[in-house]
């Protein structure tokens, strides 16, 4: 299944994603709803369109802005992070997402081992009251990356949760994509698809390099042919739905 992330839209315009979905069967393309529940505009937009959203296959990207799962329990940032996740459960009940994407951290790394311990403690707490499975993303680039390649592989192998591999983060961090996929093939349920200059987390359209996309699809078919694929682009692509439509068509063709 292919999904379109609403990361490219402002909180008040997330339903513009249907301009892309209208070009495809609901069996082909769904929505990864980026949860901006710290925004009243987002909450209103979703509530007013609940019935329409229910028509699509849905995944959630957990609250990200103004949150950090590596924050120590009892801190203001921890409390805010947990509160935003709890608030998102109302959408969880209504839309029944397939899974929720979880970021281990959202800041520059300091006291790395303590941050890792906090992140997984917070994950354990959230999954205790979340009825939807959480999947761990390889979040962060450069100084914001909590794990190196082998550390991430081992961490996922030692956790019961499955994982979502962001191939843009893999590229920007200089990881070996095939090594990651091969070692985690039994735990990968989804991918975030976008590209960059090899250094920065730019979330550019795959149309920047369709050959790169084709190389990824070969690995995808070899190791994880049943995993989901999520196009996750930056905010400059709002209003460029026709370009995203062409990217989906290219991806569907490559998957044949």
Image (cartoon, rainbow, N blue to C red):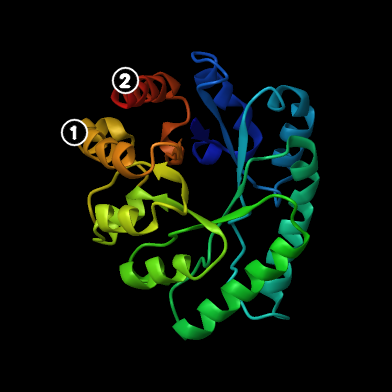
* Label 1 crowd (10 A; few <14 / some 14-19 / many >=20): few
Q: Residue at x 72, y 22 (%)?
A: 52
Q: Is residue 198 above or below residue 117?
A: above
Residue 51 % position (x, y): 77, 24
Residue 118 % position (x, y): 59, 78
Q: Describe residue 171's horizontal placement relative to residue 246 as left or right.
A: left
Q: Is residue 33 above or below residue 64?
A: above
Asked if the residue under mark 2 is in contact with the one under mark 1, i.e. CB atoms within 8 Å, the reply is no
Residues at marks 1 and 2, CA–CA distance in whole angstroms: 13 Å
Q: Residue at x 67, y 40 (%)?
A: 97
Q: Nearer the viewer, residue 105 or 167?
A: 167
Residue 224 % position (x, y): 38, 43
Which element is circle 1 on? Answer: helix
Q: Describe residue 129's horizontal placement relative to residue 175 as left or right.
A: right
Q: Quadrant of the C terminus?
A: top left
The tally of labels here is 2
Which element is circle 2 on? Answer: helix
Any part of residue 215 in sight = yes
First of labels 1, 2 by sequence position: 1
Q: Describe residue 210's horizontal placement relative to residue 162 as left or right.
A: left
* Label 2 crowd (10 A; few <14 / some 14-19 / many >=20): few
Q: Which mark is residue 51?
A: none
Q: Nearer the viewer, mark 1 or mark 2?
A: 2
Q: Is residue 122 above or below residue 42?
A: below
Q: Which residue is mark 2?
A: 253
Q: Nearer the viewer, residue 236 or 192?
A: 192
Residue 88 % position (x, y): 74, 50
| Quarter occupied by residue 153 | bottom left
Q: Nearer the viewer, residue 79 or 1?
A: 1
Q: Which residue is mark 1?
A: 211
Q: Residue at x 64, y 81 (%)?
A: 72
């Amino acid at each position: 299944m292919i999904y379109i992330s609403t990361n490219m839209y402002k909180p008040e315009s997330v339903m513009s994603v249907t301009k892309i979905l209208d070009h495809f069967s609901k069996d082909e393309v769904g929505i990864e709803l980026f949860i901006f529940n710290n925004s009243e505009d987002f909450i209103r937009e979703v509530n007013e369109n609940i019935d329409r959203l229910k028509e699509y296959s849905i995944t959630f990207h957990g609250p990200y802005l103004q949150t950090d799962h590596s924050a120590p329990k009892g801190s203001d940032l921890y409390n805010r992070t947990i509160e935003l996740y709890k608030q998102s459960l109302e959408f969880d009940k209504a839309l029944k997402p397939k899974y929720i994407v979880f970021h281990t951290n959202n800041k520059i790394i300091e006291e790395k081992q303590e941050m890792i311990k906090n992140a997984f403690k917070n994950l354990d707490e959230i999954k205790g009251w979340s009825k939807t499975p959480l999947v761990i993303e390889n979040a962060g680039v450069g100084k914001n990356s909590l794990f190196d390649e082998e550390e991430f592989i081992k961490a996922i192998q030692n956790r019961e949760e499955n994982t979502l591999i962001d191939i843009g983060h893999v590229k920007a961090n200089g990881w070996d994509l095939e090594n990651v996929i091969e070692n985690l093939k039994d735990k990968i349920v989804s991918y975030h698809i976008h590209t960059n200059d090899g250094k920065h987390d730019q979330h550019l359209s795959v149309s920047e390099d369709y050959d790169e996309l084709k190389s990824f699809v070969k690995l995808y078919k070899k190791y994880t042919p049943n995993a989901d694929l999520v196009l996750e682009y930056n905010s400059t692509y709002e209003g460029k739905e026709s370009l995203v439509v062409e990217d989906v068509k290219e991806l569907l063709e490559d998957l044949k």
